Image (cartoon, rainbow, N blue to C red):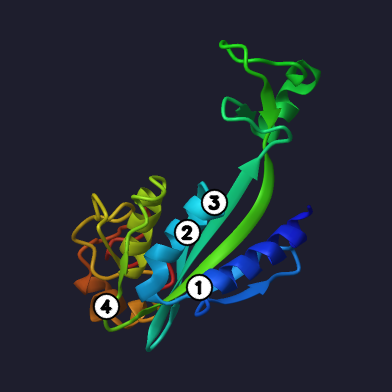
Amino acid sequence: MGKAERASAMEASIKEQFPGVATEITPRGELVARVSPGGYLDFCRYLRDEQGFKFLSMITAVDYPPDRFELVLYLDAYGASGDAPAMQVMDTRTRQELGPRSAGLTTSQGTPVMVAATLASIIVKCDVPHDHPVIPSVTPLWPTANWHEREVYDLMGIKFEGHPDLRRILLPDWFPGHPLRKDFTSKPALREPEARPWPVVWPDQKDGREPGE
C-alpha cells in the first residue's frame, strides 16, 4: 500500500472515530486534520496509539490576528519491511553514509538492522483563541514535544497545560512579549530604542540604535 492509499484509509478511520475532525489529503499524500481545542489531546493520543504515529518532528504556530493562532503538529509513522518487535531501525542517512557496509549489519544482540521508511505522515492543525491561548501539552505523548512547545510559548505566547517545564527557551525571562506575534512591533518598548531593556551598541554606533534606525 502506497503513502496516498494509507492516507485515504487513515482518513476514513478518522472520520469514523472523530466525525467532527475536518480532513484533506495534500498532493504529497499527507493527511491534514483540523481538530478543536477540546478534542486536541484525545485525537493526538489516538494518532499515537491507534495509527502508529510514534514520531513528532515539529510543533509550530501561525498568528491570525485578531482572533486566533493556528497550532500545527507534524507527525510521522515509520516502519521497515519485515518489521518485528526486536527489529532495530537505521535511518536512511546512516545507510547512505555506510554504503555497502550497511548490508547485513546486526546489533550486538544479533538482531538485523533495517532501513526505516516513512509509512504515513499527518499534519494536525488546531485553532487556539487569541483571548485565551491555552492548549493541553502533548509532551506526555511525545517527550520530544517538550522543547517544541517551549519554543511556541516563547515566540507566540501559547501556554501548554500540563507541560513539565514551561518557560522561555530562546529569549531571556525579562524579554517583553512574544516576537512572532503580528502585534509585536506595535509595543512601545519596541518602537523606541531608548525604551528597550536590551541596549544594542554596534561598533560604529554609540547611541544604542540598531543600523537603519
Between the residue at mark 1 and the residue at mark 4, the CA separation in whole angstroms equals 49 Å
Return the disc, 2 or 3, that comes first in the chain's sequence: 2
Seen at 64% across and 68% down, the residue is 11
Secondary structure beneath disc 3? loop
Amino acid type at mark 4 = Glu
In this rendering, the answer to whether 10 lies above or below 212 is above
Secondary structure beneath disc 4? loop
Amino acid type at mark 3 = Phe
Quadrant location of residue 135?
Answer: bottom left
Seen at 62% across and 17% down, the residue is 111
Q: Which residue is mark 4?
A: 192
Seen at 24% across and 81% down, the residue is 188
Near mark 1 (Cα within 10 A), the count class, few <14, some 14-19 or many ≥20, is: some
Q: Which residue is mark 2?
A: 46
Amino acid type at mark 1 = Phe
Front one among 113 and 59: 113
Query: Residue 189 at what x, y percent from top left?
Result: 24, 75
Q: Which residue is mark 3?
A: 53
Q: Which residue is mark 1?
A: 18
Between circles 2 and 4, the one closer to the viewer is 2
Between the residue at mark 4 and the residue at mark 3, the CA separation in whole angstroms equals 47 Å
